[in-house]
Image: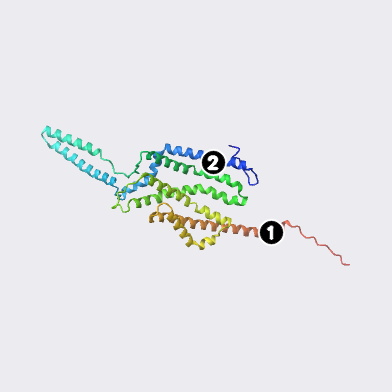
Amino acid sequence: MAAALRHVGYEDRLSLVDHLTELRVRIIVSLVAFIAATGVCMWQNHAVLSLLNRPLDQTVAHGNKDPLIEGARYDQAVKQVLLSQVVLMRQLASKSDDPATRAQAELVARRTAQAAALTPAVRARRPVTLGVGEPFMETLKVAAYAGFLLALPLILYQVYAFVLPAFSPREREIALPAMLGVPFLFIGGVVFGYFMVVPPAIRFLQNFNTDSFDVLIQAQPYYKFVILLLAAMGLLFQIPVGILALTRVGIVTTRQLSKNRRYAILVIAIIAMVLPGQDPVTMTLMMVPMYVLFEGSILISWLMDRRDRRRAVAAEESAPGEQDASSPEPEYATIDQD
């Protein structure tokens, strides 16, 4: 396996068997990393599920009309009444001269306090499972998605290491920074989506038209929505990599991108429409970072173009001087004029 993962240069020529062997080994390494990461996430599935369920915590504070939450609020109101009854019964026991009345009042106060202590707290709803095996299967699916996310940097490195030898030195200069930025941008997109996109989207969708529906959250659609939304944000954060690669290779120019901003906005809107969460809140939250990344990519591309122009001008200015310094002085023949 170590021999199959040896460094391959651009000038090296490998046989088909060598390429297939290297590909097989890199696939095995990626699968092992994915399985190991999935195992870790399955081991810590409570922490992973808690992270995914955390956006639901905001539904309680924003007046969600989930029937179970409303039932819990009613229980809390009853608890306050019971606690007030405890206070009244203990006051009655302290003021009564009859030992039997005091004992009866203390007994009622103690039992009322015990009943109040059993009242469930108001907390955000957790996703509902319907099938017998659904809790296990959903936990396994979530662990697999989370494991893929953790193993993604290593998987991308294996893909990059396999493809890079086919690039020329000039193409490698462009591909190297781009490929190194892919995992960091993906993780940045996932983090941005988790904190900035998912909570407002869940809050809007779970509180929309709640007077007409009993709002319950099923586990499979909820986790699918959240995971696909996070994956989409991670992929959308690759916009700078794609734009910089296109401009550096020469397929498009920075000037063309600047002049066609209106078409870029249209494309961004279409992409937001086909991604998970077609509601206006989610679409807006996805379009804004996409457009910011597009403008930032144009700015970075313009700065790199200006740097290249300066280098070209500096090279042209230094070339004549170097040529004069390196060329020998001409020899002039002297003609004797008699």
- Label 1 element class: helix
- Which residue is under mark 2? 27
Q: Which mark is residue 285?
A: none
**Quadrant of the frame with the C terminus:** bottom right
**Quadrant of the frame with the N terminus:** top right
Q: Is residue 308 left or right of residue 58?
A: right
Q: Residue at x 61, y 46 (%)?
A: 165
Q: Is residue 214 left or right of residue 100?
A: right
Name the image quarter holding residue 324.
bottom right
Mark 1 or mark 2, earlier in chain: 2
Q: Is the residue marked by circle 2 packed among few (<14), some (14-19), or many (20+) residues within 10 Å?
A: some
Query: Is 27 placed above or below 103 here?
Result: below
- Which residue is under mark 1? 321
User: Which is closer to the viewer, label 1 or label 2?
Assistant: 2
Amino acid on which the number 2 mark rests in the picture: Ile
Furthest residue toward right:
338
Figure coloring:
rainbow
Between 260 and 81, the one lying in front of the other is 260
Q: Residue at x 34, y 48 (%)?
A: 58
Q: Is residue 323 left or right of residue 103?
A: right
- Give the distance between the C-alpha atoms of the residues marked 1 and 2, in whole angstroms: 54 Å
Point out residue 213 in the picture as x, y percentages from the top left corner.
Answer: 30, 51
Instruction: State yes or no: discs 1 and 2 in contact (Cβ < 8 Å).
Output: no
Point out residue 102 in the picture as x, y percentages from the top left corner.
Answer: 14, 34
Name the image quarter holding residue 40.
top left
Q: Residue at x 54, y 55 (%)?
A: 244
- Label 2 element class: helix
Q: Is the residue marked by circle 1 packed among few (<14), some (14-19), or many (20+) residues within 10 Å?
A: few
Point out residue 149 in the picture as x, y percentages from the top left corner.
Answer: 47, 44
Between 296 and 212, the one lying in front of the other is 212
Between 37 and 216, the one lying in front of the other is 216
Amino acid on which the number 1 mark rests in the picture: Gly
